[in-house]
């Protein structure tokens, strides 16, 4: 299935925070949605899809060795990432949110059947508060976040070039996911930015995708 066409892909890539909409989840947690943050996102999507070091990962869950329903790639040291635009957008995010983003991990949702279950990111285990930006590339998908004890979720529909930022105590007191869906969709890539040493936890087993 071909990717969704980026309406800005003929323009030079640039970022734009003017459409930012912040939702206060509770007294200490928030989420921000910036539609169309990265103009010209299609080129980065194509580059990552073709060149990122994608791996198929497995995890122990409920005493079972399960395959993750997505592919993953990591750049623990962002300096070594070969895509120049990743450096540019990381610098823009660092300036906007006053966090020195030095590492990232990337998830590829190959079809509408790929997903990520309810979880909080690693940084929530070592920092009481954090600011975690996630850049969406490719197909449109839903992004959900709900209180850690369960309850009503907040739903965002994110398209290519959108930015979602989770802040405050959202990694401790809230859980987020990208669910499977019944409507067919092409590949989507999420680019998750983090400070040095805060990339996604290593899985039990991983194998490189040729």
Image (cartoon, rainbow, N blue to C red):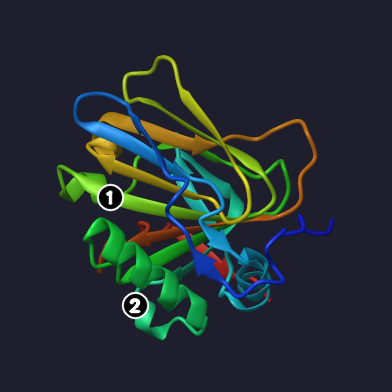
Placement of the N terminus among the 4 image quadrants? bottom right
Name the residue: 73% across, 48% down.
Answer: 111
**Hey, which residue is sitting farthest top in the picture?**
151
Name the residue: 68% across, 63% down.
Answer: 8
Residue 131's disc is 1
Name the residue: 30% across, 34% down.
Answer: 30
Residue 77's disc is 2
- Where disc 2 sits, the SS reads loop
Can residue 6 be seen here? The reply is yes
Name the residue: 34% across, 77% down.
Answer: 77
- Where disc 1 sits, the SS reads strand
**Across the whole image, how many numbered discs are drawn on residues?**
2
Circle 2 crowding by C-alpha within 10 Å: few under 14, some 14–19, many from 20: some
**The quadrant where residue 178 appears:** top right
Q: Position of residue 197 (x, y in %)?
A: 25, 67
Q: Please state which of residues 106 and 204 is positioned toward the viewer in this rendering.
A: 106
Q: Position of residue 115 (x, y in %)?
A: 60, 42
Q: Is residue 84 left or right of residue 183?
A: left
Q: Please state which of residues 123 and 40 is positioned toward the viewer in this rendering.
A: 40
């Amino acid at each position: 299935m071909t990717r969704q066409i980026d309406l800005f892909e003929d323009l030079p890539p640039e970022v734009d925070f003017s459409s930012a909409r912040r939702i206060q989840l509770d007294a200490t947690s928030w989420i921000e949605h910036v539609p169309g943050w990265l103009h010209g996102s299609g080129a980065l999507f194509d580059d990552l899809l073709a060149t990122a070091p994608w791996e198929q990962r497995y995890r122990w869950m409920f005493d079972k060795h399960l395959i993750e329903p997505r592919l993953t790639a990591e750049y623990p040291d962002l300096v070594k990432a070969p895509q120049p635009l990743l450096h540019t957008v990381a610098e823009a995010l660092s300036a906007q949110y006053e966090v020195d983003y030095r590492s990232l991990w990337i998830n590829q949702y190959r079809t509408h059947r790929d997903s990520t279950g309810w979880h909080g990111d690693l940084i929530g285990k070592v920092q009481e508060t954090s600011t975690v930006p996630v850049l969406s590339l490719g197909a449109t998908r839903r992004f959900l976040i709900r209180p850690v004890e369960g309850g009503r979720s907040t739903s965002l529909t994110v398209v290519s070039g959108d930015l979602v930022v989770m802040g405050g105590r959202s990694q401790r007191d809230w859980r987020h996911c990208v669910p499977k869906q019944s409507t067919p969709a092409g590949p989507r890539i999420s680019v998750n930015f983090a400070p040095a040493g805060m990339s996604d936890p290593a899985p039990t087993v991983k194998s490189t995708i040729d």
